[in-house]
């Protein structure tokens, strides 16, 4: 059975003191606050990470907005999975990993905290001269690379990426490496489209509203639709638009739009167009690790920029302010980072 994302257990306490740490807890929709918890001890086969950076992902934002259904998440909960930090304690029977290693994590949620424990499977060691702040976004690269492979992109295909947020801009950089005939992207904001052009988009289109149908804007230039459509949108209802934008015999790879669709989906249209609709999370653990390695190498080689989209940094104690900013749709807010390193003797 393939491993799934886990939320490491964390024991909340009423007061701060020696052996406690700060952590963020979302108790209800639109409310994320700082609590105190015990600093966890790694079990056998685990390592403890002193968390430095965690990015606010779109999936965090969906939970914050209440856009994920109860079978996916319930409240209270902890968020944060784009993680970079330093191993500060190694449990029994762990080999290879050692104290002081700089690492990125994957498949660990609930990391808006000073410390988390996890298994080695979730850990990717980073070069120590690589800036940790640029390492947190490596977590999103495995599904991006898997998306590109499942899309079966070739130089004669037209590709549409819907949305240029944090993951959308990283997706544009990845898909550009697969050399499509045309790489078309859409977004609501000029600032993000400007970055997309820098990252290899051949055509960029600004949508006037989030409800605008993509083909109403791009259809004049691409009347037959697109061989590959990759939605990088939060809301599941975007799949209706993705189906309309797909060409006959096209392929939709669902990096985004994985939430509930509140608009009816016409499956006869899927049948009539002979569309393939694919998911993106790797189905085998070995593939997850392979994509983790490949993603880091692309960043280290300068082919994927994980730094340029960082627009704001907040300390952990101001995470509520950070989420409120991230929740606002604007062109000058892309990747909001949380600095989880708290300089307090009580937290060590």
Image: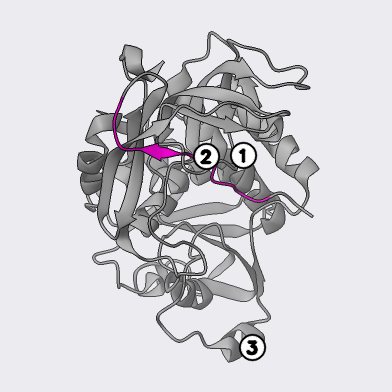
Does the segment drawn in magenta span residue 9? Answer: yes
x, y percentage for residue 65? 31, 60
| Quarter holding residue 194 | top left
Q: Nearer the viewer, residue 307 or 18?
A: 18
- Assess whether mark 2 and mark 1 are in contact (beta carbons under 8 angstroms): yes
Q: Which residues are magenta?
A: 4-16
Does the segment drawn in magenta span residue 176? Answer: no
Mark 3 closeness class: few <14, some 14–19, many ≥20 residues within 10 Å: few
Mark 3 or mark 2, earlier in chain:
2
Mark 1 closeness class: few <14, some 14–19, many ≥20 residues within 10 Å: some
Residue 148 to residue 142: above or below: below
x, y percentage for residue 294? 69, 32
Residue 233 to residue 12: above or below: below
x, y percentage for residue 16? 30, 27
Tell me if I can see residue 331 in this picture: no
| Quarter holding residue 69 | bottom left
x, y percentage for residue 205? 35, 57
Structure colour scheme = one colour
| Secondary element at tag 1 | loop
Q: Which residue is mark 3?
A: 272
Q: Is residue 164 left or right of residue 305?
A: left
Q: Nearer the viewer, residue 180 or 336?
A: 336
Residue at image coords 55%, 57%: 255
Q: Which residue is mark 1?
A: 177
Q: Which residue is mark 2?
A: 173
Measure the C-alpha gap from mark 3 to mark 2.
32 Å
Tell me if I can see residue 195 in this picture: yes
């Amino acid at each position: 059975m393939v491993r799934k994302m886990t939320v490491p257990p964390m024991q909340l306490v009423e007061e701060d003191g020696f052996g406690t740490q700060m952590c963020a807890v979302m108790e209800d929709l639109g409310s994320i606050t700082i609590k105190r918890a015990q600093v966890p001890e790694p079990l056998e086969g685990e390592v403890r990470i002193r968390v430095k950076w965690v990015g606010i992902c779109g999936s965090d934002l969906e939970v914050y907005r209440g856009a994920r259904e109860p079978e996916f998440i319930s409240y209270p909960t902890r968020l944060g999975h784009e993680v970079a930090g330093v191993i500060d304690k190694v449990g029994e029977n762990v080999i290879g990993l050692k104290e002081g290693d700089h690492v990125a994590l994957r498949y660990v949620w609930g990391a808006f905290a000073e410390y988390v424990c996890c298994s080695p499977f979730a850990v990717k060691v980073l070069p120590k001269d690589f800036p940790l702040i640029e390492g947190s976004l490596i977590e999103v690269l495995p599904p991006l690379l898997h998306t590109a492979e499942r899309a079966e992109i070739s130089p004669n295909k037209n590709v549409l990426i819907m949305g240029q947020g944090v993951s959308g801009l990283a997706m544009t950089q990845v898909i550009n490496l697969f050399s499509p005939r045309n790489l078309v992207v859409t977004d609501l904001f000029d600032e993000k489209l400007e970055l997309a052009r820098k990252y290899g988009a051949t055509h960029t289109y600004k949508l006037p509203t989030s409800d605008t149908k993509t083909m109403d804007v791009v259809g004049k230039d691409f009347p037959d639709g697109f061989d590959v459509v990759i939605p990088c949108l939060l809301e599941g209802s975007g799949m209706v638009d993705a189906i309309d934008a797909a060409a006959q015999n096209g392929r939709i790879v669902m990096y985004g739009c994985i939430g509930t669709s509140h608009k009816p989906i016409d499956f006869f249209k899927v049948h009539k167009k002979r569309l393939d609709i694919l998911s993106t999370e790797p189905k085998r653990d070995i593939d997850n690790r392979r994509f983790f390695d490949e993603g880091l190498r692309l960043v280290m080689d300068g082919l994927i920029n994980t730094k340029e989209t960082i627009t704001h940094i907040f300390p952990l104690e101001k995470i509520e302010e950070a989420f409120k900013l991230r929740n606002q749709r604007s062109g000058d807010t892309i990747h909001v980072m949380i600095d989880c390193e708290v300089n307090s003797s009580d937290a060590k």
